[in-house]
Structure formats: structure tokens, C-alpha cells
Image (cartoon, rainbow, N blue to C red):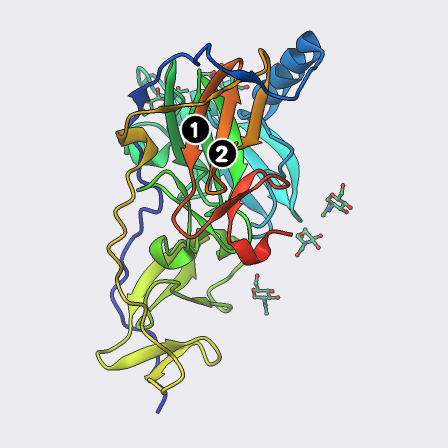
């Protein structure tokens, strides 16, 4: 029995919740030296160039990788700018706030300007726009992180006011509730799979990563959550709801007790960090944690339970994926 999917209520999604920042301490003195020596001025210049160009320190990652073709990404630290991604590469970085366009759209309205609305994937005036439409910014001297909207896997790690791009590996996704990479069933983000290219004649159905009786429809590049009629389960092979066969198993809800970084006391790094640049080092004793150094300031970050730090990709991953 196949049931059609139309005529269901659309639920709008907020994929990115914001983490509350906390104040961190200076790195300790009672430490060993991390194994890096660099030309400090050159590193500093390169960081500034990346910040200016892309809004984030790239950390050797592809900003446009692993997202739908022809997606517009918001720009960290500038509500008017956007980044256009084509075929996995940055195609252009541009601004909505072109003076002639602002004048045409805003007229005499005070405080009116044009901003990039990532949810609508377009430039709109800032009048009456909710703040969730914008990416957060780093706050001076606090450790915080927030998801890079529309990517599901990428996030921005802030420490000492530097926004550094990070990316979860394999199929892991960034969980804004715990500030770290997590198993997709606890995040259930599909925003990165919804392309602007999809037309009403070419509807995309995406299975939920969390729940068998839930799925998403992509419309105008945004996913809308749907639920199957009671007793039926979403089947990706037919993009339809159907009775459950014994093969699919429900994910049991786990009580996991993970404290987000932004709401727990910062753990000092017991190494001496390089004075310049952004570095990630394997922990000296624990495989499920790592050191994060920003301009000489070090902190210890924990992986989600079940994940271990992979020095090669500098992220937490499932042990089976670490070479
Ligand atoms: C972007 O907009 C938000 C909400 O209006 C505001 O709080 C924030 O300061 C703005 N950011 C920039 C860089 O202008
Ligand atoms: C955002 O970027 C535009 C274009 O590059 C620039 O004119 C504007 O001053 C920037 N706004 C902020 C708050 O940095
Ligand atoms: C993206 O960049 C890669 C490497 O620079 C290149 O091989 C590829 O052709 C580019 N793709 C597009 C669509 O420009
Ligand atoms: C993305 O779109 C561009 C422009 O339409 C096209 O040339 C390219 O082949 C597409 N890339 C992929 C991976 O679909
Ligand atoms: C429908 O969208 C998918 C995903 O973007 C694309 O690969 C496919 O070519 C599209 N089909 C048509 C008929 O436009």
C-alpha cells in the first residue's frame, strides 16, 4: 500500500540553535611546548586575508564542500554579504548592500538596508526580519560555537574572537545543543541536501535521520518536516509512507548527558600553545579529547561519547573511520 505525500502540514525548521558563550581563562604556564614553529607574521597575514575574504578562518576546509549545488551561504560577521557555491567551490563572494539597490528598496526608511536571508536564499530589506535569519558572531574572549547555516556538517568555533571553520567528518553532523560533532540521528539536519535547483515538478523527499515516520520535502531550497500517518514509515526507495517491514528498526532515545562546551567550565590545555595561529593537537593521554590553541591560548575539548579525535582530519570521528 502506497500513500501519497501531499496535503500534509508543513512544519518550518530551525536547524541552528545558538550556543550561549562563556568566559574562558588564559592558558596555563606549567606546560610542555607543542611541536610547532612558524613564521608568525606570515601566519597572521594569512589569517587576516581569509577572515576578510570569507568571514572565517578556513582551516584547510572547503567552505562549499558537501552541500547542494548552487547554494548561497551566509557570511559570518556581515549580514549583507553572501557566498555563492557552485560545484563544491566558492564561485563568488558578494554583497546585497549595493547603494543603488538599497536606495531603490529602502527609499527614505531610516536604518533600512539590504541583508542576505539564507532561509529565503535571497536579499531582502532588514525591516521586520527575525534575528534567527542571521548567523551569530564571535564574542570577544569567549569560547563558543555555532553551526554554519545550510551546511549541516560545518560549524564555526570561536575563541579569542577568531571564527574558525570546522567540519564534522563522515556522516556526523554539528549538534548546536552540545556544541560538537554528533551522530546524525541526534541532529537530523537535511538543509545541505535541499537544492535551489529543485522545481515544483521535481520534488525532493528526504528521509529523516532521527525517526522512521518522519521525512522532509524540499521547497525553494529549504526542508520542511513531514510525518507519515500513524503506523506508517517513510521508505526512501519509493519516497513514500508505507507499512513498516521488519528490517527497519526504531532508534531508541538515549539519555546521553553531554554538557555543551558553552555551558560548562572551560578545561585548560596542559600544553604550551604556539604563540600565533590556530592549531588542533591530539590530547596527550586521552583519545576522546583534543587541544585547541588560538594565538597562544589553549583549551581542551571533548568528543561526543563514542567518537575519538583523528589527528589527520583534526576532528572527532567514529573509531572505524580513523586510519
Ligand atoms: C546582524 O544582524 C543581527 C540582528 O539584527 C545583529 O544583532 C548583528 O549585530 C548584525 N551583525 C552585523 C555584523 O552587522
Ligand atoms: C559588509 O560588507 C559590505 C560589502 O563588502 C561592506 O560595505 C559593509 O561595510 C560590511 N558591513 C559590516 C558591518 O562589516
Ligand atoms: C572546483 O574546484 C576543483 C579544484 O580546484 C576543480 O577541479 C573543479 O573543476 C571545480 N568545479 C567547478 C564546478 O568549478
Ligand atoms: C552545478 O551547477 C553548475 C552550473 O549549472 C553545473 O555546471 C555543474 O555541473 C553542477 N555541478 C554538479 C556537481 O552538479
Ligand atoms: C531533480 O533534482 C535533482 C537534484 O538536484 C537533479 O539531480 C535532477 O536532475 C533533477 N531532475 C529534473 C528532471 O530536473
Residue 4 at x, y percent in the picture = 35, 81
Q: Earlier in the sequence, mark 1 or mark 2?
A: 2
Work out whether residue 274 can be spotted: yes
Say whether marks 1 and 2 touch (CB < 8 Å): yes
Q: Is residue 224 above or below residue 35?
A: below
Tell me the residue at 47%/38% (across/down).
Answer: 286
Mark 2 surroundings within 10 Å by alpha-carbon count, few (fewer than 14), some (14 through 19), many (20 or more): many
Tell me the residue at 41%/55% (across/down).
Answer: 183
Mark 1 surroundings within 10 Å by alpha-carbon count, few (fewer than 14), some (14 through 19), many (20 or more): many
* Foreground residue among 265 and 159: 265
Q: Is residue 280 left or right of residue 178?
A: right
Q: Which residue corresponds to mark 2?
A: 290
Q: Is residue 185 above or below residue 165?
A: below
Tell me the residue at 51%/68% (across/down).
Answer: 202
Check mark 1 vs ligand 1: CB closer than 8 Å? yes or no: no
Check mark 2 vs ligand 3: CB closer than 8 Å? yes or no: no
* Foreground residue among 242 and 291: 291
Work out whether residue 116 can be spotted: no
Residue 71 at x, y percent in the picture = 55, 46
* Foreground residue among 140 and 195: 140
Q: Is residue 127 left or right of residue 172?
A: left
Q: Is residue 235 above or below residue 155?
A: below
Local SS, label 1: strand
Q: Quadrant of residue 123?
A: top left
State which image quarter holds ligand 1: top left
**What's the mark number on residue 233?**
none
Q: Is residue 121 left or right of residue 257?
A: right
Quadrant, the N terminus? bottom left
Local SS, label 2: strand
Q: Which residue corresponds to mark 1?
A: 300
Residue 59 at x, y percent in the picture = 60, 30
Q: CA distance from mark 1 to mark 2?
A: 6 Å
Amino acid at each position: 500500500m502506497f500513500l501519497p505525500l501531499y496535503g500534509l502540514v508543513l512544519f518550518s525548521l530551525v536547524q541552528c540553535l545558538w550556543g550561549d558563550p562563556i568566559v574562558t581563562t588564559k592558558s596555563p604556564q606549567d606546560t610542555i611546548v607543542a611541536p610547532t614553529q612558524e613564521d608568525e607574521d606570515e601566519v597572521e597575514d594569512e589569517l587576516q586575508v581569509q577572515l576578510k575574504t570569507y568571514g572565517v578562518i578556513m582551516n584547510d576546509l572547503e567552505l562549499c564542500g558537501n552541500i547542494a549545488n548552487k547554494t548561497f551561504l551566509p557570511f559570518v560577521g556581515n549580514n549583507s554579504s553572501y557566498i555563492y557555491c557552485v560545484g563544491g567551490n566558492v564561485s563568488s563572494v558578494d554583497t546585497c548592500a549595493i547603494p543603488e539597490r538599497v536606495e531603490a528598496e529602502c527609499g527614505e526608511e531610516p536604518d533600512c538596508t539590504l541583508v542576505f536571508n539564507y532561509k529565503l536564499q535571497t536579499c531582502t530589506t532588514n525591516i521586520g526580519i527575525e534575528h534567527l535569519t542571521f548567523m551569530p558572531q564571535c564574542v570577544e574572549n569567549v569560547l563558543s560555537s555555532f553551526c554554519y547555516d545550510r551546511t549541516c556538517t560545518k560549524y564555526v568555533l570561536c575563541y579569542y574572537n577568531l571564527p574558525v571553520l570546522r567540519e564534522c567528518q563522515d556522516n556526523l553532523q554539528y549538534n548546536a545543543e552540545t556544541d560538537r560533532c554528533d551522530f546524525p540521528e541526534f541532529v537530523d539536519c537535511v538543509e545541505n541536501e535541499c537544492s535551489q535547483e529543485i522545481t515544483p515538478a521535481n520534488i525532493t523527499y528526504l528521509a529523516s535521520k532521527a525517526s522512521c515516520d518522519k521525512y522532509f520535502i524540499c521547497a525553494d531550497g529549504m526542508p520542511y518536516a513531514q510525518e507519515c500517518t500513524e503506523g506508517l514509515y517513510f521508505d526512501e526507495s519509493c519516497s513514500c509512507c508505507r507499512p513498516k517491514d521488519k528490517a527497519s528498526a526504531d532508534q531508541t532515545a538515549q539519555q546521553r548527558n553531554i554538557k555543551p562546551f558553552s555551558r560548562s567550565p572551560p578545561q585548560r590545555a596542559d600544553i604550551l600553545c604556539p604563540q600565533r595561529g590556530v592549531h588542533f593537537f591530539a590530547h596527550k593521554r586521552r583519545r576522546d579529547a583534543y587541544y585547541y590553541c588560538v594565538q597562544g591560548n589553549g583549551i581542551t575539548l571533548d568528543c561526543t561519547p563514542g567518537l575519538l579525535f583523528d589527528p589527520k582530519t583534526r576532528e572527532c570521528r567514529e573509531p572505524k573511520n580513523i586510519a
